[in-house]
Image (cartoon, coloured by chain):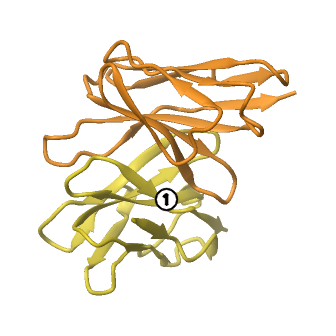
Chain colours: A yellow, B orange
Amino acid sequence: AQSVTQLDSQVPVFEEAPVELRCNYSSSVSVYLFWYVQYPNQGLQLLLKYLSGSTLVKGINGFEAEFNKSQTSFHLRKPSVHISDTAEYFCAVSLSNFNKFYFGSGTKLNVKP
Amino acid sequence: DGGITQSPKYLFRKEGQNVTLSCEQNLNHDAMYWYRQDPGQGLRLIYYSQIVNDFQKGDIAEGYSVSREKKESFPLTVTSAQKNPTAFYLCASSQPGQGISEAFFGQGTRLTVV
């Protein structure tokens, strides 16, 4: 069975500081990996995705993530956060042979001035 | 603009009543999904459909029903058998078979039992 673990439920950080949101997954087969962002009372918006190729993936709003197969991780990073990055972030995986998505429990990023 | 439309945005239901949440997409996607979101629990899959006239139960299907009579529409009915229906419901779609595409989400429906 596939599972996604987001290790931190909340991450407080000051504006302009770097941030890393952690995501680990378990799967016995190849997976595709995604990070989504959700603002209050809205749907999810794709930040970035890893399908194949370079393990460092760049997304929108200055975010990037690195796929580490040996550690089964896909951590999200941003070198300098803004107040507007305050939101909830979800990591998701999909099996390479089946378009079904499994989501982590989410990490709330709170950027403080 | 292509996208997914969920309606209504807010819905109130009395105990014992069935309610239907609408989800329409104009992305020409074959696959559609319904997720339930509760605080601290992430997204849990209720039902999904890979093709018209076919759908499968997800992890928490009890107390819910769906239909997929048209490619663009995937309504979710929350029945009186669902013991704790108050939640935020998200509909999504994707296009399997063309590489792996991400899921596209609607803006959600917040259901409250009163």
Q: Residues within 10 Å of mark 1 (few under 14, many from 20)?
A: many
Residue receiving disc 1: A90
Q: Name the residue located 63 percent from the left edge and 70 percent from the top edge.
A: A9
Q: Name above or below for residue A55 compared with residue A92.
A: below
Q: Which residue is drawn at 33% across and 79% down?
A: A72
Q: Does residue A49 appear to the left or right of B7 in the view shown?
A: left
**Image location (x, y in percent) of residue B95:** 24, 36
Left-right relation of A55 to A1: left
Residue at the (50%, 24%) spot, across then down: B66
Q: Position of residue A7 (x, y in %)?
A: 55, 77
Callout 1 amino acid: Phe
Question: In front here: A62 or B113?
Answer: B113
Q: Which residue lies furthest to the bottom in this view?
A: A70
Q: Which chain carries label 1?
A: A
**Is residue A55 toward the left or the right of residue B108 in the image?**
left
Which quarter of the figure has residue A92?
Answer: bottom left
